[in-house]
Amino acid sequence: MQDAFLRAAERWPRDGTPANPGAWIVSTARNRAIDRIRREQTLVRKTELLARAETLPVDEEAVIPDERLELIFACCHPALAPEAQVALTLSLVGGLETAEIARAFLVPETTLAQRLVRAKRKIRDAGIPLRVPAEHLLPERVRLVLATIYLVFNAGYGPPVRRELCGEAIRLAAVLATLMPDEAEAHGLHALLLLQDARRDARVSPAGELVLLADQDRSVWDTGEIEQGRRALDRALPLRSPGPYQVQATIASLHYEDPVDWEEIAVLYGRLSGLTPSPVVELNRAVAVAMASGPEPGLAIVDGLTGLERYHLWHSTRGELLQRLGRNGEAAAAYSRALELAPSETERTFLEGRLAASVS
Amino acid sequence: MQYLLLINDDEKVWGDMPEDERNAVYGEYTRYTGELQSRGILVGANQLQPSGTATVVHVEDGKTITTDGPYAETKEVLGGYYLIDVDTLDEALEWAAKIPSARYGHIEVRPIVMREAEVAS
């Protein structure tokens, strides 16, 4: 199957990248290697799982396992650097432009382009297989794939929103969860993506502005998708193998309740911090703490965080909390900094509104 | 595809090892090599003499400069290799992990450049 990468690498500089490079690679590889695949014993297992996938309930009928699964396992191979794995998946599976991926990663476009070239060359020259890994390699590989799918979703969640990317991520998560029914975190990720996607129409106004959760029009929340997400979570939890996606999905599910139990959400963010320590998780916990117990304890957490100096949401959260404490001058300064760092027009418009409110 | 599995380890660890333990590891190597052979994927393998026996040659302006010792002053040095022929990197990585020295040092897995004539054959 390396042949397909080889041919792609030869042809793309000449012919330009095909509209859907991922699918192109897969079909080329499949055509050339079909006899060989037939001999693979893993196919027996795969065929069995694909057969199971066909028995999915009607409301998830749109979920069809497809050949992109093989491609995504190749893109998420541990022989590739983590940042290359995500970039490759977004490029080959998600079909994103190099510039868009660069923006999602906060790296210069030239850096990202080089990263992609090096990664493709390694897949081709090192013989990274284009197939679902052998059973005993799966747990580790699945973890890498889940992380990548989540990043694809986030790249589509925007703003600007790229529906097709979110849909693609949900589809891949559903396929994984179906093919790996005992993998609690695959169901957890599937649940999380559905629950986040369910408020896609509420979180951006018709004018393209971001709408805070508290101000969202509940009538445009996708109740069907919320239900689907909760059902996916119900499939994850009995497997008794907790993980960060299940915790996040639980948090997302709690957000749809009225009133929202912010105390419980703050506790869950604390648990998430224990599973995957990160200043961004702590930033979210700070918001939940502020909602549950007031802006002061929230701001204390925000101000204690390091490493987020170039993250616009850190500055905008500070601005929000400072404003609520009546410290308008500091709030305005924080919003101004957030404005400089904001990656999209939608977010800038939103922040301009907050800034204007803080100086009035 | 062919892969070279380069065995890098600390010679001092190897030298300080009690004899019975070293013999046990040699036994593992023999079994490992036998398994590669019986599966028909072994292309070649060799253990190298210690790095103290190495000589480095460099040609500058047509003049050969010969110096004693290994090229790089690192703790872990190349101690031997296996050349194997398998289908994918995944298989090569699994075989690399089974090399006894993977527990003491590091195995670098490098794909071999195959010329067109060799690929066709």
Image: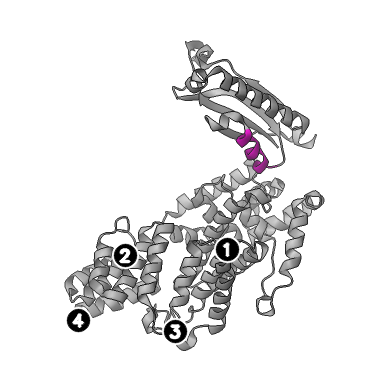
Q: Earlier in the sequence, mark 2 or mark 1?
A: 1
Residue under numbered circle 4: A360
* Mark 4 or mark 2, earlier in chain: 2
Mark in the foreground, 2 or 3: 2
Q: CA distance from mark 2 to mark 3?
A: 26 Å
Q: Position of residue A167 (x, y in %)?
A: 58, 71
Which mark sits nearer the N-terminus, 2 or 3? 3
User: Label 4 sits on what residue type?
Assistant: Ser
Q: Is residue A229 visible?
A: yes
Q: Is residue B19 left or right of residue A277?
A: right
Are dots 1 and 4 in contact, CB under 8 Å?
A: no
Q: Position of residue A220 (x, y in %)?
A: 49, 86
- The residue located at (25%, 62%) in the rendering is A303
Badge number at residue A206 = 3
- Magenta range: B88-98
- Real-space Cα separation, disc 2 to disc 1, in angstroms: 31 Å
Which residue is denoted by mark 2 in the rendering?
Answer: A314
Number of callouts: 4
